[in-house]
Amino acid sequence: MKNGIFVILLAFCFCNQALAQLPKIPHLKTNRAVNDLGIKIGEKQTFSIDLKKDVYYTIITQQQGIDLVVSLFDNSGKLIQEVDSPNGMFGPEKILYSPDSSGQFIISIKPLEEKSNAQQGRYSVALNEIPGMLKKLSSEQMLQDFELLQNAYYETRIGLWYNSRTQFDSVCNIQKGKIRDRMSALDFYRIIAPVVAYTKEGHSNIKVSDEVSAYLKQEGTYFPFCVKILNGKVYLLNDIENFKTKGYIVSRINGESINDILGKFLSIEPADGYNITSKYRWIEAAFSKYYTRYFAPAKSFKLVLIDPKDNNEVVYSNIPACNFKEFGKISAEVANTIPNYGYKEAATFSIDLDAGVAVLTVNSFSLDSYKNRREGFRNFLVETFKAISGAKIKNLIIDIRKNEGGEQGMEDHLLSYLINRDYEKYKYVEIPAFTYSFLEYTDYKNEADILKKELTEDFYRANDGRFLNRDGHYEGESPNSNNFQGNIYILINGLTFSGGSEFAALAKNYTSAKFIGEETGGGYYGNSSGTFLKLTLPNSGITARVPLCKFVVSAKETGIPFGHGIMPDYFVQPSIDEYLKGFDSEMEYAKNLIGKQP
């Protein structure tokens, strides 16, 4: 018995000694920064933190001469988040997180393992709890931010494709006049967002500051519905608790008409030219978030709805608002229950031998969407059109309704299978300059030479002073030897944007394809995109995406009004019942057209 006690005591002492030999992880306290820490390539440094359930925290690591990867783990070692933003060796790496249960978590910080990274550097790290109020800005601070963005637009000519300088100045002066002392960055966002929308450049957008984003997640109340906009009407896509609302038309929310609410959102959503279909598609995807940004927090909602079956009015009071996490669960449930709500694969292909129809769906031109990136997409097309040729298919439906673009040139890979001669893609591509006065506020801070080097690879200064694309850059592709010779039908809508819309424009110009759906979100005559500068306004923290390249499509005599996208030959939009049930109206319309062929 005594021997047994001795063995237990010996084991206990040994365990204590082993634990004492383990390195102790430093603990990071809330709302306190640890500054001037050194780190080397191959080294990893960790900190423990204590987080409370449903409280939002920011973890901010300031890089000082070395590119870092920051990771957040739970206490069991499961990775929660990992960030390595494209800001190089300087600037912040930020994590925003709210745990579902209280406990201890681990932050891991290590240098990025790349040859271009520094061998050693320094950093600071801070864990901050989100404050319950937004800080106030002075009118001078907001005016400085406003004029910084305005002048950046003038330097890059954003807003001057569809507007005169006088028109743009007028809008800026109106919005500038709304600035009042002691406004929050959220108030300022509401003032400056309509200016961004007035540029009529769909690739330009702004985002609220990290502080505002975190505040809205912590303190914001959310409209507990997902919506779909069809023929200008806003439909609810889900029921909530004991309220039957799915499929109903929204008439009023908390006393305000849906048309007035939509008008506010339309005024802050940029689009190419005078297009509105892209605005509807983007607004419906972010309706609740926009509502939270624009309207005061509400604990509940009073809804006036219309039953589309009999046009009777239905009034519901005291529908409870939800928080950000709860809204995320609602969104996920809607995405899982409504067919075709989103997509899982970047591209798919099928053949109906009996009908003699092939369906090619290309949801994205993003390189990251494909295994082996560009080569992966090319291989997919090779196999697709080999199968079409082998099956002797005469009718091809191409679905690009969810294709918001991606990498330059991906649209040409697809077009090469649909044409039988070479084509001119752009009239020209132009940039405003090789360098800009506001670079210190962008992701090219201290890297003006790098930006100039990148731009001079594609552009040169012409004799007339313009900066134009070099010969051989931004050109199309020759016809593929296995090109399709039959009838082409292309499904389009407001989400058909950027490279997706450029493909539609090229197909309009160089094939006899028939277009079905609604106007594309991207402009037929071109867009401003390509290289982007990420501009951060120093006082409000609002970030703006500033495109540099003006792509002017080599347009044909199509009758498409300036400032609009590809117009469908057959306008088709589902009813709300068809949409909720997953009946694909545009696809079935295309198949019916094919079936009517002699």
Image (cartoon, rainbow, N blue to C red):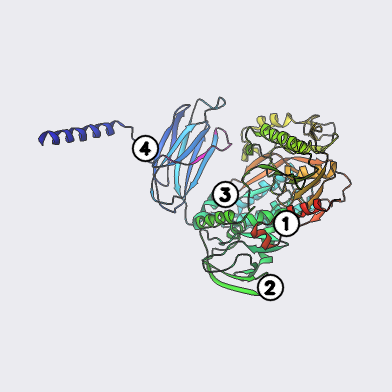
Q: Position of residue 51 (x, y in %)?
A: 40, 48
Residue 26 is tagged as 4
Q: Quadrant of the N terminus?
A: top left
State the predominant SS element of the stretch in magenta.
loop
- Vertical arrangement, residue 264 with respect to residue 507, above or below: below
Where does the magenta region start and end?
A: 77-89
Q: Residues at badges 1 and 2 in contact (C-beta under 8 Å)? A: no
Q: Residues at badges 2 and 3 in contact (C-beta under 8 Å)? A: no
What residue sits right under mark 2 in the picture? 311
Disc 1 versus disc 4: nearer the observer: 1
Q: Quadrant of residue 257?
A: bottom right
What residue sits right under mark 1 in the picture? 585
Which kind of residue does numbered mark 1 sit on?
Ser
- Vertical arrangement, residue 493 with respect to residue 477, above or below: below
Q: In screen coordinates, is 214 left or right of 49?
A: right
What residue sits right under mark 3 in the picture? 209
Q: Residue at x 67, y 59 (%)?
A: 579
Which kind of residue does numbered mark 4 sit on?
Pro
Q: Residue at x 51, y 61 (%)?
A: 322
- Vertical arrangement, residue 397 with respect to residue 481, above or below: below
Indicate the secondary structure of the residue bearing disc 3.
loop
Q: Of label 4 and label 2, which has the lower sequence position? A: 4
Which kind of residue does numbered mark 3 sit on?
Ser
Q: Of label 2 and label 3, which has the lower sequence position? A: 3
Indicate the secondary structure of the residue bearing disc 2.
loop
Q: Of label 1 and label 4, which has the lower sequence position? A: 4
Cα distance, mark 4 to mark 2?
Answer: 64 Å
Cα distance, mark 3 to mark 4?
Answer: 30 Å
Indicate the secondary structure of the residue bearing disc 1.
helix
Q: In screen coordinates, is 165 left or right of 311?
A: right
Cα distance, mark 2 to mark 3?
Answer: 42 Å
